[in-house]
Image (cartoon, rainbow, N blue to C red):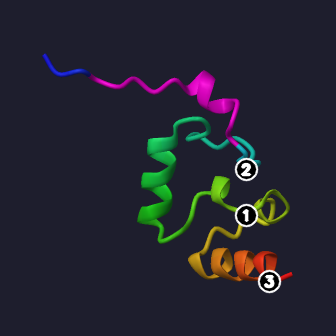
Amino acid sequence: MKNQRICNQKENMKGCTCTYPNCPRKGICCECIRYHRKMNQVPGCLFPQDSEKSYDRSIENFIKVWNKKLNT
């Protein structure tokens, strides 16, 4: 029998920084990553907190935000 990992949504919620209301993937990191990858986006948890609230998850925005933050 293979060991299966079980998602601990309750534990994951402690570190989930997504502020999108009613997100069905909140705390289910593997689903969140899969969804945003399929949409050619970056999950909100990888954005700085002040930028995450824009809900612009585009790769272009991710690069722009981090370039600005790192070069300030």
Q: Which residue is mark 1?
A: 55
Image: 55 above or below 20? below
| Gap in angstroms between the C-alphas marked 3 and 2 | 28 Å
Which residue is pictured at 68% across the width and 78% down the height? 61
Among the two numbered marks 3 and 1 on one chain, the one whose residue lies closer to the N terminus? 1
| Gap in angstroms between the C-alphas marked 1 and 2 | 7 Å
Q: Which mark is residue 20?
A: 2
What amino acid is labelled 3 in the image?
Asn
Which residue is pictured at 76% across the width and 77% down the height? 70
- Do the residues under discs 3 and 2 have CB atoms within 8 angstroms? no
Q: Foreground: 40 or 16?
A: 16
Image: 56 above or below 46? below
In the image, the segment drawn in magenta is 4-16
The chief SS type of the magenta part is loop
What amino acid is labelled 1 in the image?
Tyr
Image: 34 above or below 31? below
Mark 2 residue element = loop
Crowding around mark 1 (Cα neighbors within 10 Å: few <14, some 14 to 19, many 20+) is few
Give the quadrant of the N terminus. top left
Q: Which mark is residue 71?
A: 3
Q: Is residue 7 magenta?
A: yes
